[in-house]
Image (cartoon, rainbow, N blue to C red):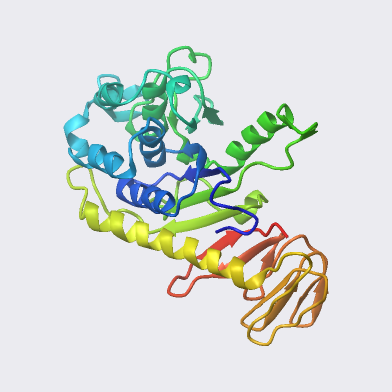
């Protein structure tokens, strides 16, 4: 479990863009559910928007996978009658299918949900209210491939295209939305201290021209990032969908388990401390040492270098108060923050 988070604490999920990466996103959702985590809200972009919308509509991860894999994307695509609107293909068939599967409006979903889109003038925008199927399709409208999509009631900024063009993940935009909500949500006479812990699933980029996906650059804390490879799917063949889903679930489950184990071995309550592999301890301060690198909250020493940050160093690496831990067998880091 993330440090400072119990299975009863609702967390948010952020599902990145990733060309036809439905299987990996569904596997990530399956791991989250099997870990017993409560989900408060979901943010999705492109493939993440399609997957997240179905999940927030009440489908289980396996039902989400079924709906997104029972037909190849090509069966829903048609040549655009207005290619000058930005793409050779129309998403009208996708919108029609989403109308069969989803409620008509965001407000009808069982969880909070938002999608990332790009406006007609190139700005990244979250849509979290109003007509749902059109907004979800718009989030997947890859420029030059699909024509931009009109969302009823939002003609001022539309038509809209894939949010991944500017921001593949949308974490900062989602967190800013949460902060606005929490500014007006008071608990026990005081404002809530921070947005919910966020679990972020990032698919490896398929295009060098897509937007940002650097999570450390957002400056956000209390997040966990799980990365998955690109799907390898195409409009005519989604590949080994079940295998890809299973691998994604195993990947996420492994990382959640490692963090749960790390929390249990690295932090002590009531002013206690713990260490492993020869790390230093300090009485009265929760501390942890992994692979010989000792870290103290608000008084950090890594390999003899003193620093003052609000974070926990794992494997000796700290970035803006975030702990960066390399998981065995993976070249990608997991990023999370402690709540000591």
Instruction: Give the camera-side residue of 310 and 151.
Output: 310
Q: Position of residue 198 (x, y in %)?
A: 57, 47
Instruction: Give the camera-side residue of 19 and 101.
Output: 101
Q: Is residue 251 above or below residue 58?
A: below
Write the residue at 38% across / 25% down: 148
The N terminus appears in which quarter of the rendering?
Answer: bottom right
Q: Position of residue 228 (x, y in %)?
A: 40, 58
Instruction: Give the camera-side residue of 49 and 42.
Output: 42
Write the residue at 30% across / 49% down: 23
Q: Position of residue 42 (x, y in %)?
A: 49, 38
Residue 281 falls left or right of residue 33: right
**Residue 260 seen in the figure:** yes
Q: What is the residue that sits farthest to the front in this orientation?
A: 270
Q: Quadrant of residue 74?
A: top left
**Residue 142 seen in the figure:** no
Q: Is residue 99 above or below residue 44?
A: above
Residue 246 falls left or right of residue 288: left
Q: What is the residue that sits farthest to the bottom in this orientation?
A: 278
Q: Is residue 334 above or below residue 242?
A: below
Q: Exactly how many numbered labels are in the figure?
A: 0
Residue 146 falls left or right of residue 210: left
Q: Position of residue 282 (x, y in %)?
A: 81, 77
């Amino acid at each position: 479990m993330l440090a400072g988070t119990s299975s009863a604490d609702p967390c948010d999920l952020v599902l990145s863009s990733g060309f036809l990466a439905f299987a990996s996103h569904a596997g990530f959702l399956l791991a989250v559910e099997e870990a017993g985590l409560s989900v408060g809200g979901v943010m999705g972009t492109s493939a993440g928007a399609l997957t997240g919308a179905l999940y927030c509509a009440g489908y289980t991860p396996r039902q989400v996978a079924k709906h997104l894999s029972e037909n190849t994307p090509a069966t829903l695509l048609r040549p655009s009658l207005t290619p000058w609107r930005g793409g050779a293909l129309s998403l009208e068939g996708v919108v029609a299918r989403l109308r069969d599967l989803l409620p008509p409006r965001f407000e009808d979903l069982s969880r909070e949900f938002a999608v990332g889109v790009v406006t007609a003038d190139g700005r990244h925008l979250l849509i979290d209210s109003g007509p749902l199927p059109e907004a979800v399709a718009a989030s997947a409208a890859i420029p030059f491939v699909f024509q931009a999509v009109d969302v009823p009631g939002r003609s001022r900024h539309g038509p809209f295209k894939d949010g991944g063009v500017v921001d593949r993940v949308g974490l900062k935009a989602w967190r800013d939305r949460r902060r606005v909500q929490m500014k007006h949500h008071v608990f026990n006479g005081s404002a809530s201290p921070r947005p919910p812990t966020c679990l972020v699933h990032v698919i490896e980029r398929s295009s060098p021209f897509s937007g940002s996906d650097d999570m450390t650059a957002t400056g956000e804390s209390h997040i966990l990032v799980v990365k998955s490879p690109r799907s390898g799917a195409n409009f005519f063949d989604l590949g080994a969908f079940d295998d890809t889903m299973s691998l994604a679930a195993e990947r996420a489950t492994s990382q959640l388990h490692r963090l749960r184990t790390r929390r249990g071995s690295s932090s002590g309550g009531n002013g206690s401390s713990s260490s492993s592999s020869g790390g230093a301890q300090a009485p009265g301060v929760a501390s942890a040492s992994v692979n010989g690198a000792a870290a103290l909250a608000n008084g950090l020493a890594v390999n003899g270098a003193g620093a003052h940050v609000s974070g926990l160093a794992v494997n000796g690496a700290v970035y803006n108060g975030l702990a960066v831990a390399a998981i065995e067998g993976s070249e990608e880091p997991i990023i999370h923050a402690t709540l000591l």
